[in-house]
Image (spheres, rainbow, N blue to C red):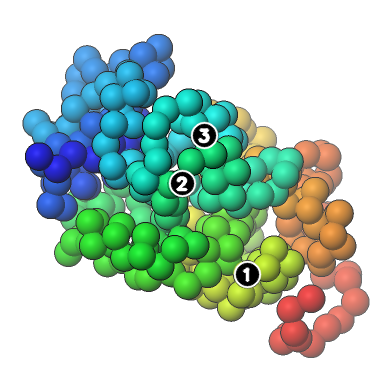
Amino acid sequence: MKQISVIGCGRWGTFLGWYVANYCDVDTVLIYGMEQSRTYQSLKNARQNEYLQLTDNMLLTSDIAQALANEFIIVSISCQNLRDLAKQINNYDVAGKTFLLAMKGLEEPSAEILADVFLSEIKQKIHVATLGGPGHVEDYTRKVPSAAVVDSYEPETINYVIQLMQSDLIRFYYGTDIIGNQVGAALKNVIGLAAGILDGLGWYGLKGALMARAPIEVGRLIKYKGGNPASVYGLAHLGDYEATLFSKNSHNRTFGEMFAKGERYGKLAEGVDTLRAVKAIADRAGIDMPICQALYKVIFEDAHIKQTIRSLFDRSLKKEFEPWM
């Protein structure tokens, strides 16, 4: 019997379990969640959440040892909790297992990519891949197809994951730059916050300029981290803009919109913590990231939103295309 595990029973983790259970050559999917969590209890009691119904071949467990017994494990939790989870996993025998990190963010305050966070805490030989690209649960469950990119430090691990997960619902591409794809995926959440603020102000016309200029500064960060800045134009960043900068289902865009309106958003928006990490590394390394710097002032320093946006237009004039950095 072929069984895989998912650690994390939130919106995305549960969807990925549902996807593998229904679209891939897998017999059963085991979804792990903490017994006391509201999402786990909802799935346990009702066998459904607000997005989908669990199928018969989807099992639930609150025993992490049971979840770690399988050879392929998808991880979908809050980015800022990943290091603690990795430390916990390291207490079990997971040598040789493959982990797919299905979150998008940078650790705060270290600004490390998630693959490096995970690998640094697990002192056993494991295989780690990352998932990036567009896609919302609400669209996938309506059978709207999309594409994604899988990346890893190990080409054979990319191939293993794609061969297991490929279907006619999601077309997977082979990544060639895990650093660029991880940074790009994380920063598209940050840019989603900015897009939401423009929506909240009713300044929709500026979103085109945001889409054009944001990849330039994200590319600078990718280059600083050792990746290929051109990766910013792939599925993990620019390819995810529609799902993040425009979709009503985007948590980050909705956070920004409600923030601009002076309202509180109660769901997780990973871009907020990632923005803290970006600000720290940009300051430390002297990376020119004016959009992210302005966004930080607005969200964390109570800067006047409209004045801060207008200040971006007062900067010295530049050529549109210049070498990164």
Name the image quarter holding the N terminus: top left
Question: How far across and down, in percent of the image, does residue 205 sit?
Answer: 60, 68
The residue at which mark 1 appears reads as: 227
The residue at which mark 3 appears reads as: 86
Instruction: Please give left or right for residue 75 compared with residue 245 in the image.
Output: left
Please name the residue shown 53% across and 38% down the image: 122
Secondary structure beneath dot 2 equals loop
| Front position in the image: 237 or 72 | 72
Of the two numbered discs 3 and 1 on the same chain, state the one appearing first in sequence.
Answer: 3
Instruction: Please give left or right for residue 85 compared with residue 248 in the image.
Output: right
**Outermost residue toward the top in this view:** 36
Q: Nearer the viewer, mark 3 or mark 2?
A: 2
Q: Amino acid at mark 2?
A: Lys
Secondary structure beneath dot 1 equals loop
**Above-or-below relation of 253 to 185:** above
**Above-or-below relation of 117 to 30:** below
Name the quadrant containing residue 62: top left
Please name the residue shown 79% across and 76% down the image: 325
Label 2 and label 1: CA atoms lie apart by 24 Å
